[in-house]
Image: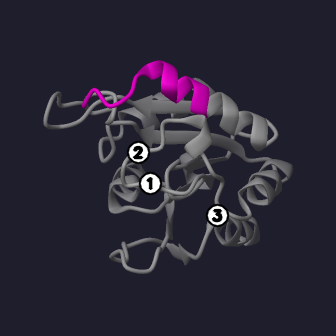
């Protein structure tokens, strides 16, 4: 079984835009992300992105836009993220267990990659990222942004690099 770090996208990998990040020219990495991904990768962690992309359900952008952003993300991060699962749903249009705080996308990744949850982590910047992780037994890391509520987590980090260093020390 493999150890894994599950990652939220917006606010963890790239700078979060309240109007959605769905264009390549809007996709800006948070400082230290590439270094953090390399550190985790070099220490044997599978890296899996789990992200809600509700702008699809709202008709703001399409699957093609997400695909282009993810291709660009792979390019600028050195192709260190091993897999991506995203939910195109929004609760005002369609209920889905795949949308965080549901745990379906985590469960799919765990089954697909034979992940050992006892040696795995979830890094997110919102409660909806951490709720399903706690439910299935992952160790949680909250990237706390000033001005947002603090979430219950096993560790509070200032950014992904801070989180990666803490994970490696465990």
Which one is closest to the eye, mark 3 or mark 1?
1
Image location of residue 95, percent across then percent down: 18, 31
Question: Which label is found at residue 17?
Answer: 1
Quarter holding the C terminus is bottom right
Q: Are circles 1 and 2 on residues that touch, CB within 8 Å?
A: yes
Read off the residue under disc 2.
20
Q: Is residue 66 left or right of residue 37?
A: left
> Residue at 49% of width from left, 40% of height from top?
50
Residue found at the far left of this picture: 92
Gap in angstroms between the C-alphas marked 1 and 2 = 5 Å
How many numbered badges does the structure rendering display?
3
Which one is closest to the eye, mark 2 or mark 3?
2
Read off the residue under disc 3.
160
Gap in angstroms between the C-alphas marked 3 and 1 = 17 Å
Quarter-wise, where is residue 26 in the image?
A: top right
Residue 53 in view: yes
What range is drawn magenta here?
A: 58-69
Secondary structure type for disc 1: loop
The earlier-in-sequence mark between 3 and 1 is 1
Residue 61 among magenta residues: yes
Q: Nearer the viewer, residue 128 or 89?
A: 89
């Amino acid at each position: 079984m493999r150890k894994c770090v599950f990652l939220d996208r917006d606010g963890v990998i790239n700078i979060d835009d309240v109007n959605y990040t769905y264009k390549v020219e809007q996709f800006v990495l948070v400082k230290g992300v590439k270094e953090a991904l390399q550190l985790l990768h070099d220490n044997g962690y599978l890296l899996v992105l789990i992200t809600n992309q509700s702008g699809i359900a709202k008709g703001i952008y399409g699957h093609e836009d997400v695909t282009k952003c993810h291709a660009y993300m792979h390019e600028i991060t050195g192709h260190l993220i091993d897999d991506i699962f995203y939910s195109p749903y929004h609760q005002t249009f369609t209920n889905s267990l795949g949308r965080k705080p549901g745990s379906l996308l985590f469960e799919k990744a765990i089954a697909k990659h034979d992940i050992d949850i006892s040696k795995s982590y979830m890094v997110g910047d919102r409660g909806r990222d951490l709720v399903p992780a706690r439910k299935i037994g992952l160790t949680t890391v909250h990237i706390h942004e000033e001005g947002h509520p603090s979430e219950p987590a096993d560790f509070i980090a200032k950014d992904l690099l801070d989180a990666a260093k803490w994970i490696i020390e465990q």
